[in-house]
Image (cartoon, helix red, strand yellow):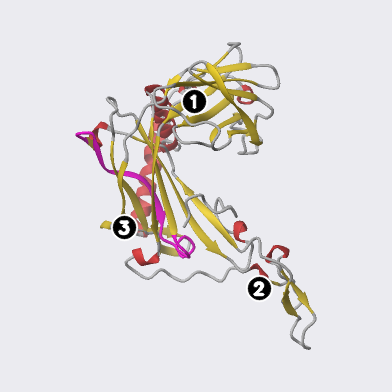
Amino acid sequence: MGVVRSVSSSNSRITHFIKKCKATFLLFGIIGCVEPVSFEVPPAGSLLVVEGYVSSSDGPHTVKLSRATNIESDTLVSSPVTEAIIDLYENDEIVARFNETLPGNYQIDKGQVTGAIGSDYHIKFSTMEGSVYESLPDKLRAVGQISEVHLELERKTRLTDFGETDASAFNVLVDSKSGPLKDAYIRWRYSAFYGVDTYPSLYMRDEPPYTPFKDPWPCSGYIVVEGPPGSGGKLERIGDCTCCECWGKISEPAPTLSNDELVRDGEFYNVFVGQVPITATVFQQKVMLQVEQMSLNRAAFDFFDLIRSQKENTQSIFQPATGELRGNVRAENKSDAVIGIFYATSINTAVLFVDSANVPYKIPEETFLTLPCAEITSNATYEMPELWE
Protein backbone atom coordinates (compact mmCIF):
# COMPACT_ATOMS: atom_id res chain seq x y z
CA MET A 1 0.00 0.00 0.00
CA GLY A 2 1.16 3.51 -0.62
CA VAL A 3 0.06 6.97 -1.56
CA VAL A 4 0.96 6.75 -5.23
CA ARG A 5 0.63 10.39 -6.21
CA SER A 6 -1.00 13.66 -5.31
CA VAL A 7 -3.29 15.78 -7.43
CA SER A 8 -4.65 19.21 -6.63
CA SER A 9 -7.74 21.23 -7.43
CA SER A 10 -8.88 24.62 -6.18
CA ASN A 11 -12.19 26.44 -6.43
CA SER A 12 -12.24 30.20 -6.36
CA ARG A 13 -15.41 32.19 -5.90
CA ILE A 14 -15.06 33.73 -9.36
CA THR A 15 -14.60 30.36 -11.07
CA HIS A 16 -17.53 28.91 -9.13
CA PHE A 17 -19.75 31.85 -10.15
CA ILE A 18 -18.80 31.63 -13.84
CA LYS A 19 -19.41 27.86 -13.95
CA LYS A 20 -22.75 28.28 -12.21
CA CYS A 21 -23.85 30.94 -14.70
CA LYS A 22 -22.73 28.88 -17.70
CA ALA A 23 -24.59 25.83 -16.39
CA THR A 24 -27.74 27.91 -15.81
CA PHE A 25 -27.75 29.38 -19.31
CA LEU A 26 -27.05 25.96 -20.85
CA LEU A 27 -29.88 24.36 -18.89
CA PHE A 28 -32.38 27.04 -20.01
CA GLY A 29 -31.26 26.58 -23.62
CA ILE A 30 -31.65 22.81 -23.50
CA ILE A 31 -35.02 22.88 -21.75
CA GLY A 32 -36.32 25.22 -24.42
CA CYS A 33 -35.54 22.60 -27.09
CA VAL A 34 -36.99 19.55 -25.34
CA GLU A 35 -40.55 18.47 -26.09
CA PRO A 36 -42.52 16.83 -23.27
CA VAL A 37 -42.97 13.07 -23.62
CA SER A 38 -45.91 11.26 -22.07
CA PHE A 39 -45.98 7.52 -21.39
CA GLU A 40 -47.67 5.17 -18.94
CA VAL A 41 -45.74 3.57 -16.09
CA PRO A 42 -47.01 1.31 -13.32
CA PRO A 43 -47.93 3.07 -10.06
CA ALA A 44 -44.85 3.26 -7.80
CA GLY A 45 -46.58 1.54 -4.94
CA SER A 46 -47.31 -1.54 -7.07
CA LEU A 47 -43.73 -2.02 -8.30
CA LEU A 48 -41.84 -4.74 -6.42
CA VAL A 49 -38.07 -4.19 -6.16
CA VAL A 50 -35.81 -7.23 -5.62
CA GLU A 51 -32.10 -7.28 -4.81
CA GLY A 52 -30.17 -10.34 -3.70
CA TYR A 53 -27.40 -12.82 -4.33
CA VAL A 54 -25.81 -16.07 -3.25
CA SER A 55 -22.03 -16.19 -3.08
CA SER A 56 -19.13 -18.63 -3.00
CA SER A 57 -18.62 -17.77 0.68
CA ASP A 58 -20.49 -19.47 3.52
CA GLY A 59 -22.81 -16.47 3.79
CA PRO A 60 -24.84 -14.86 5.00
CA HIS A 61 -26.75 -14.71 1.71
CA THR A 62 -29.37 -11.98 1.44
CA VAL A 63 -32.45 -10.81 -0.43
CA LYS A 64 -34.15 -7.43 -0.01
CA LEU A 65 -37.75 -6.81 -1.03
CA SER A 66 -39.44 -3.40 -1.15
CA ARG A 67 -42.05 -1.37 -2.99
CA ALA A 68 -40.92 1.59 -5.05
CA THR A 69 -41.68 5.02 -3.57
CA ASN A 70 -43.65 7.55 -5.57
CA ILE A 71 -41.45 10.53 -6.50
CA GLU A 72 -44.17 12.86 -5.18
CA SER A 73 -44.29 11.12 -1.81
CA ASP A 74 -43.33 13.09 1.31
CA THR A 75 -40.90 10.36 2.34
CA LEU A 76 -37.70 8.95 0.87
CA VAL A 77 -38.00 5.70 2.80
CA SER A 78 -38.89 2.70 0.65
CA SER A 79 -41.70 0.44 1.78
CA PRO A 80 -40.34 -2.98 2.86
CA VAL A 81 -42.20 -6.09 1.75
CA THR A 82 -42.62 -8.31 4.78
CA GLU A 83 -43.71 -11.90 5.44
CA ALA A 84 -42.59 -13.21 2.06
CA ILE A 85 -41.59 -16.86 1.66
CA ILE A 86 -38.30 -17.16 -0.28
CA ASP A 87 -36.63 -20.44 -1.26
CA LEU A 88 -33.13 -20.85 -2.70
CA TYR A 89 -32.67 -23.42 -5.47
CA GLU A 90 -29.37 -25.07 -6.42
CA ASN A 91 -29.55 -26.94 -9.74
CA ASP A 92 -33.38 -26.89 -9.51
CA GLU A 93 -33.52 -28.34 -5.97
CA ILE A 94 -34.50 -26.36 -2.86
CA VAL A 95 -31.48 -26.09 -0.55
CA ALA A 96 -32.54 -23.40 1.95
CA ARG A 97 -35.20 -20.89 2.93
CA PHE A 98 -34.47 -17.25 3.67
CA ASN A 99 -35.53 -15.95 7.08
CA GLU A 100 -36.74 -12.37 7.59
CA THR A 101 -34.22 -10.69 9.93
CA LEU A 102 -35.48 -7.11 9.49
CA PRO A 103 -38.57 -5.77 7.68
CA GLY A 104 -37.97 -6.53 4.00
CA ASN A 105 -34.52 -8.07 4.63
CA TYR A 106 -34.22 -11.84 4.25
CA GLN A 107 -31.15 -13.92 5.04
CA ILE A 108 -29.72 -17.43 4.98
CA ASP A 109 -27.51 -17.67 8.04
CA LYS A 110 -23.76 -17.97 7.74
CA GLY A 111 -22.60 -21.58 7.40
CA GLN A 112 -25.91 -22.94 6.15
CA VAL A 113 -25.12 -22.75 2.41
CA THR A 114 -21.86 -22.30 0.50
CA GLY A 115 -22.18 -21.51 -3.19
CA ALA A 116 -20.40 -23.98 -5.48
CA ILE A 117 -18.53 -22.94 -8.61
CA GLY A 118 -20.38 -24.27 -11.68
CA SER A 119 -23.77 -24.72 -9.97
CA ASP A 120 -26.92 -22.85 -11.04
CA TYR A 121 -28.87 -20.83 -8.48
CA HIS A 122 -32.21 -19.05 -8.45
CA ILE A 123 -34.97 -18.07 -6.02
CA LYS A 124 -38.70 -18.52 -6.05
CA PHE A 125 -40.86 -16.57 -3.62
CA SER A 126 -44.38 -15.51 -2.80
CA THR A 127 -45.69 -12.41 -1.04
CA MET A 128 -48.39 -12.30 1.60
CA GLU A 129 -50.82 -11.09 -1.11
CA GLY A 130 -50.30 -14.38 -2.94
CA SER A 131 -48.19 -13.12 -5.85
CA VAL A 132 -45.44 -15.50 -7.00
CA TYR A 133 -42.08 -14.53 -8.50
CA GLU A 134 -39.03 -16.41 -9.75
CA SER A 135 -35.53 -15.42 -10.87
CA LEU A 136 -33.81 -16.94 -13.87
CA PRO A 137 -31.06 -19.49 -13.04
CA ASP A 138 -27.55 -18.05 -12.79
CA LYS A 139 -24.35 -20.10 -12.90
CA LEU A 140 -21.82 -19.29 -10.18
CA ARG A 141 -18.55 -18.52 -11.93
CA ALA A 142 -15.04 -18.18 -10.55
CA VAL A 143 -13.51 -14.74 -10.22
CA GLY A 144 -9.92 -13.51 -10.11
CA GLN A 145 -8.34 -11.74 -7.19
CA ILE A 146 -7.40 -8.27 -6.04
CA SER A 147 -3.65 -7.71 -6.32
CA GLU A 148 -3.43 -4.42 -4.42
CA VAL A 149 -5.49 -1.64 -2.93
CA HIS A 150 -3.66 1.68 -2.96
CA LEU A 151 -4.33 5.36 -2.39
CA GLU A 152 -4.02 8.60 -4.31
CA LEU A 153 -4.10 11.86 -2.38
CA GLU A 154 -6.32 14.49 -4.00
CA ARG A 155 -5.90 17.99 -2.61
CA LYS A 156 -8.98 20.11 -3.19
CA THR A 157 -11.21 22.72 -1.61
CA ARG A 158 -14.92 23.41 -1.65
CA LEU A 159 -16.83 26.65 -1.44
CA THR A 160 -19.02 27.21 1.63
CA ASP A 161 -20.97 30.16 3.01
CA PHE A 162 -17.87 31.03 5.01
CA GLY A 163 -15.40 30.80 2.13
CA GLU A 164 -13.20 27.99 0.87
CA THR A 165 -12.52 25.02 3.12
CA ASP A 166 -10.32 21.98 2.72
CA ALA A 167 -12.06 19.00 1.11
CA SER A 168 -9.08 16.76 0.40
CA ALA A 169 -9.60 13.01 0.10
CA PHE A 170 -7.89 9.74 -0.66
CA ASN A 171 -8.94 8.16 -3.94
CA VAL A 172 -9.09 4.38 -3.47
CA LEU A 173 -7.64 2.48 -6.45
CA VAL A 174 -7.51 -1.25 -7.16
CA ASP A 175 -5.23 -3.48 -9.21
CA SER A 176 -6.63 -6.93 -9.87
CA LYS A 177 -6.65 -10.01 -12.08
CA SER A 178 -9.74 -11.15 -13.95
CA GLY A 179 -8.93 -14.83 -13.43
CA PRO A 180 -10.20 -17.63 -15.71
CA LEU A 181 -13.20 -15.65 -16.98
CA LYS A 182 -13.33 -15.45 -20.77
CA ASP A 183 -15.60 -12.42 -20.58
CA ALA A 184 -14.58 -10.37 -17.55
CA TYR A 185 -17.88 -9.15 -16.12
CA ILE A 186 -16.68 -7.90 -12.74
CA ARG A 187 -18.01 -5.60 -10.06
CA TRP A 188 -15.87 -4.03 -7.36
CA ARG A 189 -17.96 -3.23 -4.27
CA TYR A 190 -16.36 -0.66 -1.99
CA SER A 191 -17.03 0.41 1.59
CA ALA A 192 -14.99 2.11 4.30
CA PHE A 193 -15.52 1.90 8.06
CA TYR A 194 -14.09 4.31 10.62
CA GLY A 195 -14.11 4.26 14.41
CA VAL A 196 -15.43 7.18 16.43
CA ASP A 197 -15.25 7.86 20.20
CA THR A 198 -17.55 10.28 22.02
CA TYR A 199 -18.05 11.23 25.67
CA PRO A 200 -21.80 11.38 26.46
CA SER A 201 -21.07 11.19 30.20
CA LEU A 202 -19.76 14.78 30.02
CA TYR A 203 -22.82 16.25 28.34
CA MET A 204 -23.87 19.64 29.73
CA ARG A 205 -27.43 20.80 29.28
CA ASP A 206 -27.98 24.52 28.77
CA GLU A 207 -31.56 25.72 29.11
CA PRO A 208 -31.70 29.52 29.51
CA PRO A 209 -31.96 31.32 31.80
CA TYR A 210 -30.38 28.58 33.94
CA THR A 211 -26.70 27.89 34.34
CA PRO A 212 -25.49 24.86 32.30
CA PHE A 213 -25.69 21.70 34.36
CA LYS A 214 -24.33 18.15 34.13
CA ASP A 215 -26.73 15.80 32.41
CA PRO A 216 -25.00 12.60 31.26
CA TRP A 217 -26.86 10.52 28.71
CA PRO A 218 -28.34 7.34 30.23
CA CYS A 219 -26.40 5.21 27.73
CA SER A 220 -23.12 6.66 29.03
CA GLY A 221 -23.25 4.51 32.18
CA TYR A 222 -22.99 7.57 34.48
CA ILE A 223 -25.38 9.49 36.70
CA VAL A 224 -25.03 12.69 38.72
CA VAL A 225 -24.96 12.35 42.51
CA GLU A 226 -24.59 14.91 45.24
CA GLY A 227 -21.17 16.57 45.35
CA PRO A 228 -19.41 19.47 47.07
CA PRO A 229 -21.37 22.75 47.27
CA GLY A 230 -21.21 24.65 43.98
CA SER A 231 -19.90 21.65 42.04
CA GLY A 232 -23.20 20.84 40.37
CA GLY A 233 -22.84 17.28 41.65
CA LYS A 234 -20.35 14.64 40.69
CA LEU A 235 -20.45 11.85 38.14
CA GLU A 236 -20.84 8.30 39.38
CA ARG A 237 -20.43 5.28 37.15
CA ILE A 238 -23.23 2.72 37.40
CA GLY A 239 -22.56 0.65 34.28
CA ASP A 240 -20.81 0.35 30.95
CA CYS A 241 -21.22 2.91 28.21
CA THR A 242 -23.20 1.55 25.27
CA CYS A 243 -22.99 4.64 23.05
CA CYS A 244 -19.40 5.88 23.40
CA GLU A 245 -17.85 4.02 20.46
CA CYS A 246 -19.37 3.40 17.06
CA TRP A 247 -18.35 2.81 13.46
CA GLY A 248 -19.39 5.03 10.58
CA LYS A 249 -19.67 3.68 7.05
CA ILE A 250 -18.82 5.23 3.69
CA SER A 251 -20.43 3.45 0.76
CA GLU A 252 -19.73 3.63 -2.93
CA PRO A 253 -21.71 6.35 -4.75
CA ALA A 254 -22.44 3.94 -7.64
CA PRO A 255 -21.46 0.40 -8.72
CA THR A 256 -17.93 0.09 -10.15
CA LEU A 257 -17.80 -2.28 -13.12
CA SER A 258 -15.07 -3.72 -15.32
CA ASN A 259 -14.15 -1.74 -18.41
CA ASP A 260 -12.21 -3.04 -21.41
CA GLU A 261 -10.17 0.16 -21.44
CA LEU A 262 -8.72 -0.68 -18.02
CA VAL A 263 -7.71 -4.29 -18.65
CA ARG A 264 -4.42 -5.50 -20.10
CA ASP A 265 -3.72 -9.21 -20.49
CA GLY A 266 -6.38 -10.11 -17.95
CA GLU A 267 -5.23 -7.55 -15.38
CA PHE A 268 -6.87 -4.32 -14.26
CA TYR A 269 -4.86 -1.33 -13.07
CA ASN A 270 -5.83 1.76 -11.07
CA VAL A 271 -9.57 1.10 -11.02
CA PHE A 272 -11.19 3.91 -9.03
CA VAL A 273 -13.67 2.44 -6.53
CA GLY A 274 -14.32 5.27 -4.04
CA GLN A 275 -13.00 8.02 -1.81
CA VAL A 276 -12.13 8.55 1.84
CA PRO A 277 -12.65 12.17 2.98
CA ILE A 278 -9.75 13.40 5.09
CA THR A 279 -11.49 14.81 8.15
CA ALA A 280 -10.86 14.76 11.88
CA THR A 281 -13.89 12.54 12.45
CA VAL A 282 -13.03 9.92 9.82
CA PHE A 283 -9.39 9.72 10.96
CA GLN A 284 -10.06 9.96 14.70
CA GLN A 285 -9.04 6.29 15.07
CA LYS A 286 -8.37 4.49 11.80
CA VAL A 287 -10.17 3.61 8.58
CA MET A 288 -10.79 0.12 7.23
CA LEU A 289 -11.06 0.02 3.44
CA GLN A 290 -12.87 -3.05 2.15
CA VAL A 291 -13.05 -3.91 -1.54
CA GLU A 292 -14.84 -6.98 -2.87
CA GLN A 293 -14.26 -8.28 -6.40
CA MET A 294 -17.43 -10.01 -7.58
CA SER A 295 -18.08 -12.13 -10.67
CA LEU A 296 -21.23 -11.29 -12.65
CA ASN A 297 -23.09 -12.76 -15.58
CA ARG A 298 -24.02 -10.46 -18.47
CA ALA A 299 -27.57 -9.86 -17.21
CA ALA A 300 -26.37 -8.78 -13.74
CA PHE A 301 -23.60 -6.67 -15.31
CA ASP A 302 -26.10 -4.83 -17.53
CA PHE A 303 -28.45 -4.32 -14.57
CA PHE A 304 -25.76 -2.71 -12.40
CA ASP A 305 -24.50 -0.73 -15.39
CA LEU A 306 -27.93 0.90 -15.70
CA ILE A 307 -27.97 1.62 -11.96
CA ARG A 308 -24.52 3.17 -12.25
CA SER A 309 -25.63 5.30 -15.19
CA GLN A 310 -28.73 6.52 -13.35
CA LYS A 311 -26.81 7.38 -10.17
CA GLU A 312 -24.13 9.26 -12.10
CA ASN A 313 -26.72 11.22 -14.09
CA THR A 314 -29.21 12.00 -11.35
CA GLN A 315 -29.12 15.72 -12.10
CA SER A 316 -29.18 15.28 -15.88
CA ILE A 317 -32.31 15.72 -17.97
CA PHE A 318 -30.94 12.89 -20.11
CA GLN A 319 -31.05 10.44 -17.19
CA PRO A 320 -32.03 6.92 -18.39
CA ALA A 321 -35.63 5.97 -17.71
CA THR A 322 -36.13 3.78 -14.65
CA GLY A 323 -38.37 1.62 -16.79
CA GLU A 324 -35.27 0.26 -18.52
CA LEU A 325 -34.31 -1.54 -15.30
CA ARG A 326 -35.77 -5.03 -15.54
CA GLY A 327 -33.28 -7.57 -14.23
CA ASN A 328 -33.87 -11.33 -14.17
CA VAL A 329 -36.89 -11.64 -11.85
CA ARG A 330 -40.22 -12.55 -13.41
CA ALA A 331 -43.77 -12.58 -12.04
CA GLU A 332 -46.03 -15.60 -12.45
CA ASN A 333 -48.86 -13.17 -13.15
CA LYS A 334 -47.76 -10.69 -15.82
CA SER A 335 -49.87 -7.95 -14.22
CA ASP A 336 -47.57 -7.96 -11.16
CA ALA A 337 -44.87 -5.35 -11.88
CA VAL A 338 -41.37 -6.28 -10.71
CA ILE A 339 -37.77 -5.17 -11.28
CA GLY A 340 -34.62 -6.49 -9.68
CA ILE A 341 -31.84 -9.00 -9.72
CA PHE A 342 -30.86 -12.21 -7.99
CA TYR A 343 -27.47 -13.52 -9.03
CA ALA A 344 -24.72 -15.96 -8.10
CA THR A 345 -21.24 -14.56 -7.51
CA SER A 346 -17.73 -15.44 -6.38
CA ILE A 347 -16.21 -12.85 -4.06
CA ASN A 348 -12.57 -12.04 -3.41
CA THR A 349 -12.09 -9.53 -0.58
CA ALA A 350 -9.17 -7.22 0.17
CA VAL A 351 -8.86 -5.06 3.31
CA LEU A 352 -6.53 -2.13 3.95
CA PHE A 353 -6.21 -0.11 7.17
CA VAL A 354 -5.09 3.53 7.07
CA ASP A 355 -4.78 6.17 9.77
CA SER A 356 -3.58 9.75 10.24
CA ALA A 357 0.04 8.64 9.76
CA ASN A 358 -0.80 8.02 6.09
CA VAL A 359 -1.89 11.65 5.65
CA PRO A 360 1.11 13.85 4.66
CA TYR A 361 -0.15 16.86 6.60
CA LYS A 362 -1.66 17.56 10.01
CA ILE A 363 -5.39 17.03 10.26
CA PRO A 364 -7.23 19.60 12.48
CA GLU A 365 -8.19 18.11 15.83
CA GLU A 366 -11.71 16.84 16.39
CA THR A 367 -14.18 18.93 18.38
CA PHE A 368 -14.89 17.42 21.79
CA LEU A 369 -18.07 15.37 21.28
CA THR A 370 -20.52 14.74 24.12
CA LEU A 371 -23.48 13.23 22.26
CA PRO A 372 -24.15 9.52 21.73
CA CYS A 373 -21.85 8.32 18.98
CA ALA A 374 -24.43 7.16 16.45
CA GLU A 375 -26.33 10.46 16.64
CA ILE A 376 -23.45 12.41 15.09
CA THR A 377 -21.84 9.78 12.83
CA SER A 378 -23.11 9.00 9.33
CA ASN A 379 -24.51 5.49 8.75
CA ALA A 380 -23.30 4.47 12.18
CA THR A 381 -23.52 1.15 13.95
CA TYR A 382 -22.51 0.10 17.46
CA GLU A 383 -21.60 -3.35 16.11
CA MET A 384 -17.93 -3.76 15.24
CA PRO A 385 -17.39 -4.54 11.51
CA GLU A 386 -16.52 -8.18 10.93
CA LEU A 387 -12.97 -7.61 9.65
CA TRP A 388 -12.07 -4.76 12.02
CA GLU A 389 -8.78 -5.24 13.89
In the displayed structure, 38 sits above or below 175; it is above
- Magenta includes 56? no
Q: Which of 361/176 is in front?
A: 176
Q: Identify the secondary structure beneath mark 1.
A: strand
Instruction: Tell me which corner region of the image, top left, top right, bottom left or bottom right, holds residue 151.
Output: bottom left
Which quarter of the picture shows residue 319?
top left
Q: Residue furthest bottom?
A: 229
Residue 178 found in image quarter: top left
The residue at which mark 3 appears reads as 153
Query: How far, Cα to Cα, is label 2 from label 1?
Result: 48 Å
| Residue at the (53%, 62%) spot, across then down | 196
Residue 272 located within the stretch drawn in magenta: yes
Q: Which residue is mark 2?
A: 202
Q: Which three-letter amino acid code belongs to the residue tagged 3?
A: Leu
**Residue that label 1 marks:** 341
3 or 1: mark nearer the eye = 1
- Tag 2: residue type? Leu
Q: Position of residue 330 (x, y in %)?
A: 53, 16
- Residue nearest the observer in this picture, 329 or 44: 329
Badges 3 and 1: C-beta atoms under 8 Å apart? no
Secondary-structure class at tag 2? helix
Quadrant of the image for the N terminus? bottom left
Residue span colored magenta: 264-286
